[in-house]
Image (cartoon, helix red, strand yellow):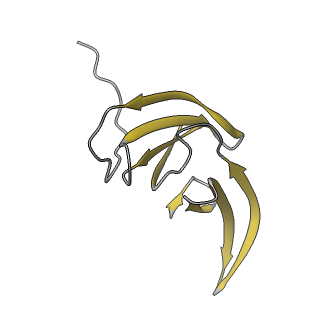
Amino acid sequence: MNWDGEYLTVADEDANIIYRFTITGAHAKLEGSTPLTGEYAGISQLWFAKGKVVGGEWRSSGWVSYWNYPAGGNPTRTIAGFKSVSGLAISPAIKR
């Protein structure tokens, strides 16, 4: 789960979908979903930054991909070759 700035999001790594919910009191209402496609779509970690969702997968191959958010679809970029991705953090680039 994560906050995208407007909705509480829940990633379903088996269905490759991010669900968006509003919360009122003890009730959640599904407001929409973002389907993720492509070879690297089964995210188990996610982070939102500037119209993108960044997701990583730790179970089998260790990769990180970027998708347009909330559009979803195929990743716009993938970085593969990690042994495992067990967490993500986004920080601004440092120009030297």
Q: Is residue 50 visible?
A: no
x then y, percent, for residue 72: 68, 41
x then y, percent, for residue 35: 70, 49
| Residue 8 figure quarter | bottom right
Question: Residue lying furthest bottom in this view?
Answer: 26
Q: Is residue 93 visible?
A: yes
Front-lying residue, 53 or 37: 37
Question: Residue lying furthest top in this view?
Answer: 96
Q: Is residue 71 left or right of residue 4?
A: right
Where is 22 relative to 34, above or below? below
Question: Residue lying furthest left in this view?
Answer: 96
x then y, percent, for residue 59: 38, 54
Name which residue lies at 33% across and 52% down: 87
Front-lying residue, 33 or 12: 12
| Residue 20 figure quarter | bottom right
Name which residue lies at 57% across and 53% down: 4
Q: Exactly how many numbered labels are in the figure?
A: 0
Name which residue lies at 33% across and 24% down: 93
x then y, percent, for residue 96: 23, 12
Q: Is residue 7 left or right of residue 47?
A: right
Where is 96 relative to 90, above or below? above
| Residue 33 figure quarter | bottom right
Q: Is residue 75 left or right of residue 64?
A: right
Where is 16 relative to 28, above or below? above
